[in-house]
Amino acid sequence: MNQVVNALRSSCVQDGCTITSLLDDHPLPLLIASQEGQSIHTLSDTLRAIALDTLGTTGGVLFRNFKVPTPLDFKRFAASFGMPLGTYEFGSTPRSKVFAGVYSSTEYPAHQSIPLHNEQSYTRQWPSRIWFHCMTSSQTGGETPIADSRQVYQAIDPAIREEFISKGLLYVRNYSSALDIPWQQVFNTDDRSKVEQYCQSQGIDWSWSEAGELSTRQLCQAAVRHPVSQEWVWFNQAHLFHISAMAQDLRQTLIEAVGEAQLPRNVYFGDGTPIPDATLDAIRAVYANTSVAFPWQAGDVLMLDNLLVAHGRNPFSGDRKVIVAMA
């Protein structure tokens, strides 16, 4: 099995499937493609073992040309790898629940890019694995770019890396339906006591305004070691939450309207000091230089180790429907 995984550039056939690297110049993702359009549920034990071995080393597997008729089939396939599927708690992006354990990947406007990130790396509890299923591929664009978080970690300037790790990151969020996702949607409840219970359990500081608006602050990691390989991975969303992620005109407008302290989201070093814009620009450049992308095909299922691999979304035109499951 390891010979199959290590020889990613050499195509081989196993149990009616072609196994190869999808991209000629990059090991991500490994492609397991059905030769006969078999049901995703007939994936052999050998192929499952190859997929799991690859997940722990390369970090990503793309299943292509399999029959995945419904979202329920996708859920069943994701759950078949033995980890219970999770809920989307304390989210930062608008998503709709398809049913328990399956969500829309995002509902951000089609013309916007979503920067590369590891799922929920802006908090202290995150999924270990994430699955994407393309039900409808877009006319143009819409790729889900991916990047090896170990390569990102290594490519970041050591001085930046050390400062981030030693200080940690403080995420500040203000939940307002007028500016961002309301707290009722983020916490999946309109009960303040349940919000407070969740925050207390996760080490999140919270406060309520007289108008009933919620603010939270949480001190989090900048990088972590993978629990199995013990390799360091870059694991945060500072480049998404930081004020420099906004267009300059929107940034100025929001600051003039509500002040920096009341921005929907922002991030500081763990000691409360600001992170320079140039530092975040350097991190964004690393993501851009380490990412790869491929066009979705309807029916594709992409399985990622959420610590080893970051993901994003490119702008698109036409209909696009991608759903997600996490564990």
Image (cartoon, rainbow, N blue to C red):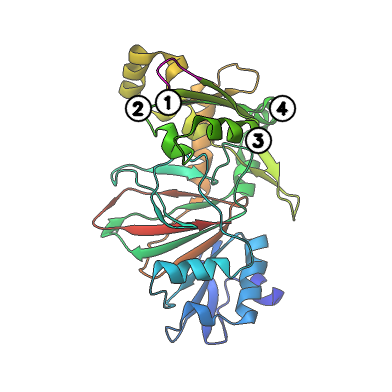
Numbered disc in front, either 1 or 4: 1
Residue 256: percent from the left, percent from the top?
34, 12
Numbered disc in front, either 3 or 2: 3
Could you tell whether 41 is left or right of 255 in the image?
right
Which residue appears at 39% of the width and 42% of the height?
94
Mark 2 and mark 4: span between their CA atoms? 32 Å
Looking at the rendered structure, the number of numbered marks drawn on it comes to: 4
Could you tell whether 154 is left or right of 267 in the image?
right
Could you tell whether 303 is left or right of 38 in the image?
right
Q: Earlier in the sequence, mark 1 or mark 4?
A: 4
Residue type marked 2:
Leu
Find disc 2 in the rendering and name its residue.
179
Is there a contact, CB below 8 Å, between mark 2 and mark 1? yes
Residue 295: percent from the left, percent from the top?
37, 62
Residue type marked 3:
Ser
Instruction: Tell me the quarter of the picture where residue 300 sits.
Output: bottom left
Above or below, comparing residue 276 to residue 312 in the picture: above
Instruction: Report crowding for label 3: few under 14, some 14 to 19, many 20 or more residues within 10 A (C-alpha).
Output: few
Residue type marked 4:
Ser
Find disc 1 in the rendering and name its residue.
264
Q: Earlier in the sequence, mark 2 or mark 1?
A: 2
Find disc 3 in the rendering and name its residue.
201
Instruction: Report crowding for label 1: few under 14, some 14 to 19, many 20 or more residues within 10 A (C-alpha).
Output: many
Is there a contact, CB below 8 Å, between mark 3 and mark 2? no
Find disc 4 in the rendering and name its residue.
166
Which mark, residue 113?
Answer: none
Numbered disc in front, either 3 or 1: 3
User: What secondary structure is marked by label 2?
Assistant: loop
